[in-house]
Amino acid sequence: MSPKRRGRLAERMTDNAQHDTPATTTHTPTRTPAAPDRPILVLGATGKTGRRVVARLRAAGHPVRAASRTAETPFDWTDRATWAPALDGVGALYLVGPPDPEPIADFVAQAKAAGVRRFVVLSGRGIEVFGDSFEPSMAEAERVVREAGVDWTVIRPNNFSQNFDEDVFHAPLLEGRLALPVGDVPEPFVDVEDIAEVAAALLTEDGHTGRTYELSGPRSLTFAEAVAEMAEASGRPMRFEDVTGEAYVAELTGRGVPEDAARSLAEVLAFLAGGHNSAPAPGVREVLGREARDFTEYARRAAEAGAWG
């Protein structure tokens, strides 16, 4: 399957990590912008993480350039004419890679030449295990920024809590049954609000250069336990069912999902079922000095907002 046909799994179900430069709790970053008079470019600004990063930066008074194919600043990885206007005058960059890794190296080189010095890259836990097999874009983005001679930081989140109310798991939950090939493996789901807060801090404070942070929730729970918590919070009947990978692919294709995309999602879930990302990671605490948001808080908040009716 070509990278172009895999779709943007990075913004759907992200995963685990390698510590090229181990993160510790000994640093004391200075919370001051590296370039206060220069805008911060946020790619994927209409996505789950990007739109929240934009909101947090603007709430803190930082100049932000929100970019995507449909955002206020037009940006398209496949249309290189959009790159220079988006990069003009930018001091820092939140990099969410494209489905196809091919343009990443050229874009990073152009960004560096345009004067961008700080790069925060969205990756996923487990990238050192699965990166080139079904998330080559994440792996390439990490490799390129590390070799670019810039101020870089990588964040590698676990599976997003918000996948249950904004993405792949939402429709099945509304129907009352979430069927996945993950067994009873525990997962420390991470709240996207935490990812956004971490990214905003890394983009605007010193002390994080050359570091890789793994981000997760504070505890691990199985998908069945997560569904039970959402059912309790929403008052809606929901149940989890473990199925085989082939049954999952058949169910997705029956819903109109292209088979290659269905099999790609099944591969991600198979990786999760291996337990590679089951232990909670300390990155949220290391960057923000507090514990990550718990899944129970996410479920309550989403239910109160009407996520599951």
Image (cartoon, grey):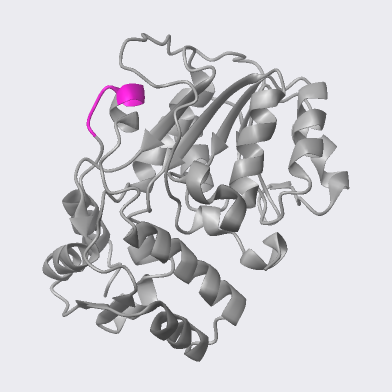
Residue 245 screen position, x and y as percent: 41, 77
Quarter of the rendering containing residue 66: top right
Q: Residue furthest right?
A: 81
How many marks the image carries: the answer is 0
Give 77 or 61, whichever is nearer the viewer: 77
Identified at 66% across, 56% down, the residue is 99
| Image quarter in which the N terminus is found | bottom right
Identified at 71% across, 55% down, the residue is 100
Give 109 or 88, whichever is nearer the viewer: 109
Residue 97 screen position, x and y as percent: 64, 46
- 30 falls in the magenta region: no
Q: Is residue 134 left or right of residue 305?
A: right
Give 117 or 148, whichever is nearer the viewer: 148
Q: Is residue 21 left or right of residue 44?
A: left
| Image quarter in which the C terminus is found | bottom left
Q: Residue furthest bottom?
A: 254
Q: Is residue 118 left or right of residue 20?
A: right
Quarter of the rendering containing residue 233: bottom left
Is the residue 44 above or below the residue 32 in the image?
below
Query: Looking at the image, can residue 60 be seen?
Result: no
Residue 259 screen position, x and y as percent: 58, 81
Identified at 52% across, 54% down, the residue is 11
Is the residue 238 above or below the residue 60 in the image?
below
Q: Which residues are magenta?
A: 286-291
Is the residue 45 above or below the residue 266 in the image?
above
Query: Looking at the image, can residue 84 be seen?
Result: yes
Is the residue 86 above or below the residue 309 in the image?
above
Residue 92 screen position, x and y as percent: 63, 25
Quarter of the rendering containing residue 149: top right
